[in-house]
Amino acid sequence: MKEIIEVMLNPVRIRIIQELAIRGNTTATELCEKISDVPRTTMYRHINILLDNHILSVVSEKRIRGSLERTLALNIEEMSKQNTFENASQNALGFLMNRYAKFHNYFNDENSDPAKDKIFLSNTILMMDDNEFDQFLSELRALFIKYNLEFANGRKARDISVISAPTDKE
């Protein structure tokens, strides 16, 4: 079994996980309809990787016209086992290295155009108490849900990362 962070950080698998986080459970067919810009065979390959690594579980199965339709859900128990304080540093490194690899590959492509592609890095320090920070995170989550739109002509996937990082101690 691969490291869970390595499995989850694939862009297609992130979209599958996000969809299941919103819906609770769904069939592979419904995932293919919702994430329609990804070819069906590619979707099934990524679903199987998530199943093989116990990130997804099969909630139910039923036969439809000779095919087996599976209803899928996130395997929260398995994901929680991996999300421990002992694994935190390794998970953070995996996440950051994945981000680095994407930028490295992008900027090594002779056709990259950061202005056209709206590629940027930004960092800011916000001064908030815990209640304000909780409100900020709630509003940010609402924005992510609001703009987690389906594929359509003219739309393209945009990979947005938000990190709440420790600040230097004074």
Image: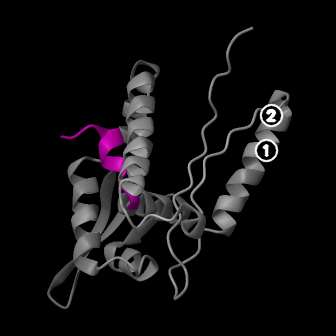
Residue 93, by quadrant, is top left
* Nearest to the observer: residue 108 or residue 147: 108
Say if mark 1 contacts mark 2, CB within 8 Å.
Answer: yes
Viewer-nearest of labels 1 and 2?
2
Residue 76 in view of the camera: no
Identify the magenta region: 1-11
Local secondary structure at mark 2? loop
Neighbour tally class for label 1: few under 14, some 14-19, many 20 plus, Cα within 10 Å? few
Q: Residue furthest bottom?
A: 65
Q: Does the image show residue 141?
A: yes
Q: Residue furthest top?
A: 170
Q: Dot 2: within a 10 Å radius of its alpha carbon, few (fewer than 14), some, or many (20 or more) residues?
A: few
Relative image position of residue 19 (x, y in whole percent): 48, 65
Q: Quadrant of the N terminus?
A: top left
The amino acid sitting under disc 1 is Phe
Residue 48 location (% of width, % of height): 22, 61
Disc assigned to residue 156: none
Residue 133 to residue 26: above or below: above
Comes first in the chain, label 1 or label 2: 2
Residue 126, numbered circle:
2
Q: Secondary structure at mark 1?
A: helix
Q: Relative to residue 28, is residue 157 drawn left or right? A: right
* Residue at the image position 81 percent from the left and 43 percent from the top: 135
Residue 162 magenta-drawn?
no
> In this rendering, would 54 be left or right of 92?
left
> Which quadrant of the rendered structure holds the C terminus?
top right
The residue at which mark 1 appears reads as 136
Q: What is the x, y in percent for residue 67?
A: 17, 83
